[in-house]
Image: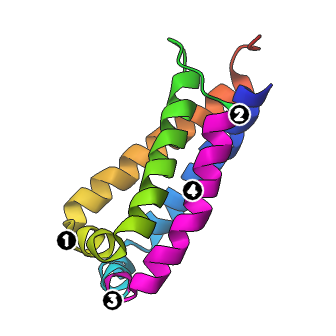
Amino acid sequence: MTSLFLAKVMGLFMLIMSLSMLVNFHKLPKLLKELAKNTALVFFSGFPAILLGLLIVLSHNVWTNDPRWIITLMGWLILIKGVLRISMPEKMAGFVSRISPRAHFVMLLIVLLLGAYLALFGFYGPELR
């Protein structure tokens, strides 16, 4: 089923991404400052985000009272992030570089927990019909 597949993929991606960023957390401020200087990278990274967001939203626009709504919400957020990156790359680059290290750490922990939740749902959740 699409929901379980997306929960597995998104959950594992979020786990891998957040763990790797937490392991390299000491490098994160420098990387974000470099990203803020490279608006072309911010701009062009918006296109894959739009594509991924559209793929999720168009294949899984499910608003239910079980974990499937999280997948749909993530698709919409990815799509919005992509649109913001191509429509205002300078502001998006500057915004990311102004977030405090503590806030980044908290966000990474949230992504880690959400990724674990989605992965568990995808691999061990009920069969959705």
Which residue type carries mark 2? Ser
Residue 55's tag is none
Dot 2 corresponds to which residue?
Answer: 59
According to the picture, the residue beneath numbered tag 3 turns out to be 37
The image shows residue 22, relative to residue 78, as above or below, that is below
Residue assigned mark 1: 98
Q: Is residue 16 visible?
A: no
Earlier sequence position, callout 1 versus callout 4: 4
Q: Label 1: how many residues lie within 10 Å, few (<14), some (14-19) or many (20+)? A: few
Who comes first in sequence, dot 2 or dot 3?
Answer: 3
For label 3, the crowd category at 10 Å Cα-Cα, with few meaning under 14, some 14 to 19 and many 20 or more, is: some
Amino acid type, callout 3: Lys
Element marked by disc 2? helix
- Distance from disc 3 to disc 4, alpha carbons, whole Å, reads 22 Å
Predominant secondary structure, magenta span = helix
Is residue 121 rendered magenta in the image?
no
| Location of residue 71 by image quarter | top right
Residue at the spot x=30%, y=79% of the render?
A: 29
The local secondary structure at tag 3 comes to helix
In the image, farthest residue toward the front = 87
Relative image position of residue 81 (x, y in whole percent): 43, 55
Among the two numbered marks 3 and 4 on one chain, the one whose residue lies closer to the N terminus:
3
- Which is nearer the eye, 48 or 104? 48
In this orientation, which residue lies closer to the viewer: 67 or 106? 67
Residue 50 is marked as: 4
**Which segment is the magenta one?**
35-59
Label 1 vs 3, first from the N-terminus: 3
Q: Left or right? Give the position of 80 relative to 62.
A: left
Report, in whole angstroms, how far the alpha carbon at label 2 lies from the one at label 1. Answer: 34 Å
**What amino acid type is highlighted by mark number 4?**
Ile
